[in-house]
Amino acid sequence: MKNAVSWVLVLFLTVTLLNNCLHTKTYKEIKKKQSFIDQLRLAYSSGDISKWPKPILDPSKPAFSEIGHLPKIEFPSDNSYSAEKASLGRILFYDPRLSGSNQIACASCHDPELSWTDNRKFSFGHDRQLGNRNAMTIMNVAYAKSLFWDGRAASLEDQAKMPIEDMREMHEHIDIATEKILKVKGYEPLFEKAFGDKKITKDRIAKAIATFERTIISPASRFDQFIDGDKEAYTDDEVMGLHLFRTKAQCMNCHNSGYFSNNLFENDGTSLLSSDEEDLGQYLITKKSSDVGKFRVPTLREITKTGPWMHNGSFNTLAEVINFYNTGNPELAKHRSTIHEGISLQSEKSDMLKLLELTKEEMLQLEAFLGTLSTPTTRPAPPKLPK
Ligand code: HEC
Ligand code: HEC
């Protein structure tokens, strides 16, 4: 009996001791983790980028410039800024008379209340026909070095004429659209203020719209405030998410600079070759076999508000997008090749996409960080259209 009591006692003591040890260990670990986050918080919100931890970049040395604020916007010398031109551009952006049906304006698919996109997988345009690509936001488009998912327009001036003539979008000949604007007497004084005389041409329409688009820039986000020194602007998870974005998750290889895009074309393994959704991406423009499946690296500013995501709107949540990157997107073999116009083509996913082994917690932290790149929605009253 005595023996049994002492055994119970010994067992009790051992369990208590072990328990205590474990407690101190987890406590120590939590403390260590917290002090790591505190250090990161101090560095990232120091207002001095040279104090930030070094990024982890791919050994292939991708085009890189550090993330940060959006720089001041530059207007091209042949289409300089004036408030009158931007204001005319805004009116034209909202004017459905540029379309064949007089029903569809640029703002139909690039709606400011929906972060200047339409939040659809594919946009519908003339006769409610569906397009085959996701509408991109025009917020911060001034920083894009080429336009569209495949880069088929070199400038906003060139770009503005394209949706007017696109059969599925606005379905109008640019010359007829210009004729229609010409007939609206109320436009004359606006063109005069913007360009010095009353002449209305398709190039002036495009220049005014492009000028307006260059003014649609995100105000400072929580990210901008945090890196400017507002230490409390971020939660611990957001601090960790920012750090992961620059290091373990390696998003910065492609989504970098103040625009969160290096403006290059990369293959994420999303071209779904030999399927109904096949999209050859940049190849359609350059006809270079190495460009099959490449799309322009999109900005991540305002990203929580511009879904569904990717050129084909295939992801409904950012958690899905992060999971896609975490697996390195093992592109299905059957979607890696196709025959297009008699030519056999292959999609070569970028080597920068690889298994990341992020934990569930880290994926949530990354998502929390992406949230800090968005700014509150604005709901500007539409302009009055001239008669
Ligand atoms: C029917 C819907 C629709 C209409 C109307 C429309 N767009 Fe778009 N817009 C899109 C889609 C879809 C894309 C992406 C297409 C692609 O990449 O092939 C796009 C892309 C763009 C881009 C490129 C953004 C970037 O980051 O590269 C700009 C700029 C743009 N549109 C401006 C305009 C202007 C200006 C008008 C009016 C003249 C207009 N859009 C009318 C749906 C539309
Ligand atoms: C190899 C370059 C590369 C890397 C690395 C990369 N991305 Fe991307 N990202 C792209 C390209 C290219 C697209 C467009 C692909 C498409 O539309 O099919 C894209 C699209 C996205 C989109 C959707 C954007 C939109 O407007 O629809 C999100 C969100 C995104 N990336 C987040 C991330 C995150 C988070 C990481 C890090 C885990 C990351 N990316 C790493 C190149 C990259």
Image (spheres, rainbow, N blue to C red):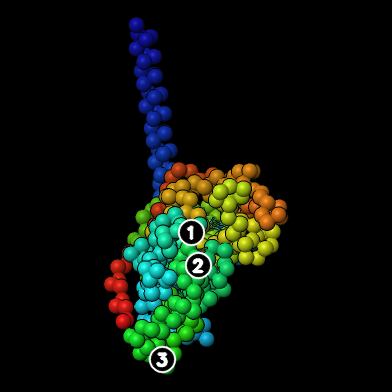
Tell me which label, 1 or 2, sits earlier in the chain.
Answer: 1
Determine the residue located farthest toward the right in the rendered image: 343
Quadrant (top left, top right, bottom left, bottom right) of the C terminus = bottom left
Residue drawn where x is 62% and y is 62% of the image: 284
Amino acid type assigned to the residue bearing label 2 in the image: Asp
Name which residue type carries label 1: Gly
**Decide: marks 3, 1 in contact (CB < 8 A)?**
no
Q: CA distance from mark 3 to mark 1?
A: 36 Å
Q: Looking at the image, is 345 positioned above or below residue 70?
A: above
Is disc 1 in contact with disc 2, using a CB cutoff of under 8 Å? Answer: yes
Residue occupied by mark 3: 198
Looking at the rendered structure, the secondary structure element under dot 3 is: loop
The type of residue carrying mark 3 is: Lys
Taking depth in this image into account, of 169 and 28 the one nearest to the observer is 169
Q: CA distance from mark 3 to mark 2?
A: 28 Å
Residue 384 vs residue 214: left or right?
Answer: left
Residue 205 lies in quadrant: bottom left
* Residue 39 in view (yes/no): no
- Give the label on residue 131, or none: 1
